[in-house]
Image (cartoon, helix red, strand yellow):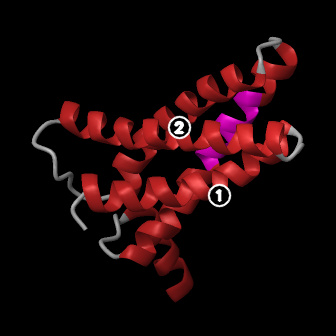
Amino acid sequence: MKVLDNLKAFLEDKPDNLVGQLLRYVVVGGISFIVDYGSLWLLTEKAGLPYLWSAAIAFILGLTCNYFLSTRWVFGESKMKSAWAEFAAFALIGVIGLGLNELIMFGCTDGLGFHYMLSKIVSTVIVFFWNFLARRFLVFKS
């Protein structure tokens, strides 16, 4: 029963420690990655957009998913006085992440010759840690 109690607490109670938040952010990041990566593939392969355009649009879709899940399930109280300020700070961190995403994808794809989908995986790992740490320490009360 202890395992079920721990699982229930993980799913229902917002953690206030770094490890608990990181574990939840991994889940949220995974869901957001599926939205981002799937959109990248659909927009590039099916809609015919250039990969960097697709990557920007897909990143924004993943960011939106991440915001809603993070504010409701991962992080505690915001440091911001209003929801608009919170979203603006969250989005600004995401825009910096988008810049990192584009630079890493361009460098890996055009510079190193990686397939754009592999470049996205490299980018995702780096941008994941930037997003988590910046949001945890700058937007939400730690």
- Please give left or right for residue 85 compared with residue 53 in the image: left
Q: Dot 1 corresponds to which residue?
A: 125
Residue at image point 28% right, 33% down: 88
Residue at image point 52% right, 73% down: 7
Helix, strand or loop status at disc 2? helix
In this rendering, the answer to whether 122 lies above or below 34 is below
Q: Position of residue 130 (x, y in %)?
A: 48, 56
Residue type pointed to by label 2: Gly
Mark sitting earlier along the chain (2/1): 2
Q: Quadrant of the C terminus?
A: bottom left
Q: CA distance from mark 2 to mark 1?
A: 14 Å
- The stretch of residues the image draws in magenta is 31-40
Residue at image point 48% right, 79% down: 6
Query: Within the image, what quadrant is residue 13 found in?
Result: bottom left
Q: Position of residue 132 (x, y in %)?
A: 45, 58
Q: Main secondary structure of the magenta part?
A: helix
Residue 101, numbered label: none
Q: Residue furthest front?
A: 111
Helix, strand or loop status at disc 1? helix
- Please give left or right for residue 140 compared with residue 102 in the image: left
Q: Dot 2 corresponds to which residue?
A: 99
Residue at image point 41% right, 49% down: 70
**Would residue 55 be counted in the magenta stretch?**
no
Mark 2 near mark 1, Cβ–Cβ under 8 Å?
no
Residue type pointed to by label 1: Val
Q: Residues within 10 Å of mark 1 (few under 14, many from 20)?
A: few
Q: Position of residue 100 (x, y in %)?
A: 56, 44
